[in-house]
Image (cartoon, rainbow, N blue to C red):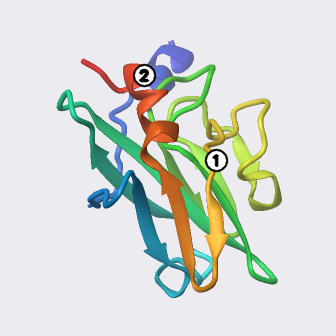
């Protein structure tokens, strides 16, 4: 019964900051996500699906980026506890150094480029996995 309570607990997500695409890409200034905290964003696709994604600064100008979903637990999302990112569904602790890499309960990686002081995410990278967030 303890497992059932744990599995069925309410999932709490911090609000996602809505972003807009311009020229087929979402562009974010690096200084907006450089504080070592987990940042949640959302983009509404052309068909109205809201795709959530995450950024975290891993140090030395390196960022981890992925969907706010994983292959195993779906779109339950993640939260940050201390130095780790935690899956809201299964409670798995994700080492920040592995953010942006596939496997386990890590957020599903999404391609992006660092261009100067900006992070550029092609909209098609987000739209390719929009079906995960479709209701």
Does residue 75 lie above or below 28 as drawn?
above
Residue under the point 30% across and 48% down? 43
Q: Could you classify mark 2 by the number of other residues whose Cα lies within 10 Å: few (under 14), some (14-19), or many (20 or more)? A: some
Residue under the point 61% across and 43% down? 110
Instruction: Using the image as rendered, state which of residue 112 and residue 101 is in the foreground.
Output: 112
Picture coordinates of residue 122 (x, y %)?
A: 50, 49
Which numbered disc covers residue 132?
2
**Mark toward the start of the polypeptide (2 vs 1):** 1
Residue 51 picture quarter: top left
* Distance (Cα) linking label 2 and label 1: 17 Å
Instruction: Using the image as rendered, state which of residue 98 and residue 11 is in the foreground.
Output: 98
Q: Could you classify mark 1 by the number of other residues whose Cα lies within 10 Å: few (under 14), some (14-19), or many (20 or more)? A: some
Give the labeled residue for mark 1. 111
Does residue 71 lie above or below 32 as drawn?
above
**Viewed as shown, does residue 2 lie left or right of 63?**
left
Residue 52 picture quarter: top left
Picture coordinates of residue 93 (x, y %)?
A: 71, 46
Picture coordinates of residue 69 (x, y %)?
A: 52, 34
Residue under the point 51% across and 30% down? 89
């Amino acid at each position: 019964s303890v497992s059932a309570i744990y599995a069925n607990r309410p999932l709490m997500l911090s609000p996602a900051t809505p972003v807009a695409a311009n020229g087929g890409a979402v562009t974010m200034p690096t200084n907006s996500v450089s504080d070592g905290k987990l940042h949640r964003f959302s983009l509404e696709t052309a068909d109205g699906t809201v795709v959530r994604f995450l950024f975290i600064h891993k140090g030395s100008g390196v960022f981890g980026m992925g969907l706010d979903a994983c292959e195993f637990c779906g779109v339950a999302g993640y939260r940050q506890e201390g130095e780790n990112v935690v899956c809201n569904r299964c409670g798995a602790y994700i080492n920040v150094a592995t953010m942006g890499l596939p496997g386990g309960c890590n957020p599903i990686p999404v391609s992006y480029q660092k261009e100067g002081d900006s992070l550029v995410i092609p909209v098609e990278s987000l739209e390719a996995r929009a079906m995960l967030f479709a209701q």
